[in-house]
Image (cartoon, grey):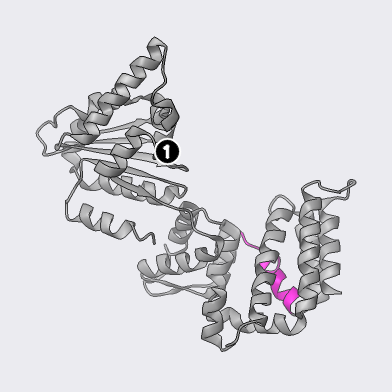
Amino acid sequence: MSKELNPLLLDINRRLFKPVYFLCGEEPYYIDLISDKIEATVLDESEREFNQTVVYGKDTDLASILSLAKQFPMMSEYQVVIVKEAQNIKELNKSADADEEGDSAQDNKKSNASAQFLQYILNPQPTTILVFCYKYKTLDKRSALAKAITKNAVYVEFSQLYDNQVPDWINNYVKEKKYVISPKASFLMAEFLGKDLSKIVNEINKLVINLKEGSEITAESVQDNIGISKDYNIFEFQDALAKKDILKANRIINYFAANEKEHHPVMITGSLYNYFSKILKYHFLPDKSKFTAATALGVNPFFVEGYAKAASNYNTGKLKQVFSYLKECDLKTKGVDNSGTPNGELLKELVFKILH
């Protein structure tokens, strides 16, 4: 979980609210989580009808938001104004270089609204809780408005996880829900669902509906309920390559080739690059004990035995060749130096080269 998240949630639960929240960054899940928490916590149900307003960036501007923010609550301690999709507000996307521009009457009007809004940020109305949900990007911090927001508001940037962080994130989320998940199950979810935390959370919540608290989410339940094939998935494919199981590896790659929409070549070569990179790293570990190796590789200890087996089948010389094959295949699937060979055939050729 993001390190910025817990203090924010703790303050909201304690009703220690701030006048302005600006939530931004590449990871929308946390932005929605904080926004939803404020929306559900500040006002009770009877107060929300008159004191809670939600607007969308594409339908509003800073002048309109300022007008809402300056209103007083009706029979309530606070009013809440939430601006969703705030990245669509043009004035917020203005760069520092544009601060001094604006010759037309329309530009001057917008500039005046920005200046007034900047003054509001410096001296916000204490009875208004104003929340910006600015997704997939961050402010140009050189602009005057951005400088005021970062200094005077609760400004938080939520970064997207790296691929290798997703399984641990899944483990922690499941633990918070008071369940457990097997290493293979968290790996499968991460590979199949990618870094979309909202989608991951939704699938986990569906998985635990019929489970008793403390129960384990297994790989089988993930496969049965999320639509991952038990036999034809990236985990089984990597396992087949590690063991040099030619029959199984070819059976899986044939399935991937026939179902390119669900198993895109770019995703496959990317996963294989990460996998073989860990095998190469394993070769050079001074301490190959289970838990030390797991920490060094950034994997669950459950998987270390598999990497050890793969390392025994792929020496450093062969791994150098594998990386060359992966690069060649990746470029060809993207149309570089490819005279028309279908992606499926390129993948089959890649597997043949890796295994022989």
Q: Which residues are magenta?
A: 227-242
Q: In the image, is residue 42 above or below residue 272?
A: above
Residue extending furthest toward the left: 75
Nearest to the observer: residue 190 or residue 296? 296
Three-letter code for the amino acid on which mark 1 is drawn: Asp
Q: For the point 18% across and 42% down, which residue is it?
A: 43
Q: Is residue 22 left or right of residue 336?
A: left
Tell whether 227 sits left or right of 155: right
The residue positioned 42% from the left and 13% from the top of the image is: 103
Residue sitting at the far top: 105
Instruction: Examine the rendered structure and indicate whether residue 114 appears above or below residue 32.
Output: above
Q: Nearer the viewer, residue 223 or 85?
A: 85
Asked if residue 228 shows in the view, the reply is: yes
Residue 141 in the image: x percent, y percent?
Answer: 39, 40
| 89 lies left or right of 269 | left
Q: Which residue is denoted by mark 1 in the rendering?
A: 140
Q: Viewed as shown, does residue 299 lie left or right of 239?
A: left
Residue 256 % position (x, y):
75, 59
Residue 317 falls within the magenta-colored stretch: no
